[in-house]
Image (cartoon, grey):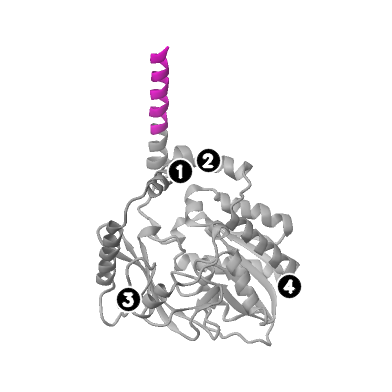
Amino acid sequence: MKNNKIIVFISIIISLLFVELFCSLIIFKKGDYNFKNANMIFSEGKVFRNIDSFFTYEPNQEITAANYYYTGEEFVEVYKYNIKTNNLGLVQEKDIYMNLPSILILGDSFTEGQGAVPWIDNFGGKYKDYQIINGGLLGTGFKQFELLEEYLSKYNIRKVFILFIGHDLRRDIFNFSPQQIKCLNDQNKCEGNEIFYGFDYSKKNPKEFLENLRKKKLKKNEDQSISFKKIRKGIKRYLLNLYVIKLPHDFFRSRFYNSKNIKILENFESIKRLSNKYDKDLFFVHLMTKNEIFFKKKTYESAYAKKFIKKITNNYYECNFDNNLDFFYKYDGHPNSNGYKYLFNCILNIFSKTIIE
């Protein structure tokens, strides 16, 4: 009897191993992309400014932004483009005026247009009789959308469009730390863990600069002791990324689980308050991400957000990028220039359906 149990146990393990290999090598063949290997650099100087509990870019700036991805052997330039900020430090060419009726588009880096020339500038600053305000800022979620809306509320906002990805539901409010601001202002003060780096393009090759930062980061990590908590979290992360666990876990969670995560609940409260304020003039647009297209299904957060939003409004739309991975960078989760052309046309189509007057 004991031998039979051992045989059954070994058979189950082997079967799960084959399922995992089949998923990873054939069905969901993984790319080489790992977001932790991405490095965002900006032209050295004034880039971001903190305003109370949120941030914008510095007003009236021309900033070069680039992303370099470390493949394990070298740094590869993923994209490089120029950002123009307006009088409010938002990513668009046109300045914003108080006396004009406005459409405010809130969102994260997809709305900002990270990775290419800002797609919102294709509107030329207006739609019909409304001026367009680009409230897209990288790394933000619903709580920060609400703070930015409050900051901009004096600009005669008539309609609000929230463009979101599932991950926005888990995001907390953040500002740039003093060390990040130092690093952005002066590349010589960068320590390697800032995520956002300033760089003087006239003096040095970005790849040399990033290689030096990588060595600093490795040295700092070597000096840090490995705790049981870190090991446990690493094992948990690894197991949850196995397809034999991830697929059934995501399936049951998306159908039966109601999150009690404090960040999610607080983001829901922000959605409620914005909905109460703007009612029928508030619109939600879910943007499919590269991973969702890759796995051919929404994340738990996207599905959960949709369920919540549709309980309070019928103004819910989607832009799925035609489920086309060619609309995204290979070494980045953001749309490329063709992906942003698609996004502009998708939002333009939604405008045509919702902005009648």
Report if residue 334 is visible in the image. Answer: yes
The reply to whether dot 3 and dot 4 touch (C-beta < 8 Å) is no
Determine the secondary structure under disc 2: helix
- What amino acid is labelled 3 in the image? Lys
Q: For mark 2, what is the residue? A: 249
Tell me which numbered mark, 2 or 4, is placed earlier along the sequence: 2
Side (left or right) of 175 relative to 282: left
- What amino acid is labelled 2 in the image? His
Q: For mark 3, what is the residue? A: 189
> Which quadrant is home to the N terminus?
top left
* Label 4 environment density (alpha carbons within 10 Å; few <14, some 14–19, many ≥20): few
Residue 240: which disc?
1
**Which-is-in-front pick, marks 1 and 4?**
1
Residue displayed at 52% across by 38% down: 248
Q: Position of residue 181 (x, y in %)?
A: 41, 76
Tell me which numbered mark, 2 or 3, is placed earlier along the sequence: 3
Q: Position of residue 260 (x, y in %)?
A: 61, 50
Side (left or right) of 137 relative to 157: left
Pick out the residue farthest to the top.
Answer: 1
**Which-is-in-front pick, marks 2 and 4?**
2
Tell me which numbered mark, 1 or 4, is placed earlier along the sequence: 1
Specify whether residue 12 is painted magenta. yes
Tell me which numbered mark, 1 or 2, is placed earlier along the sequence: 1
Q: Position of residue 355 (x, y in %)?
A: 70, 72
Specify whether residue 226 is painted magenta. no
- What amino acid is labelled 1 in the image? Leu
Residue 356: which disc?
4
Q: Is residue 102 above or below residue 76?
A: below
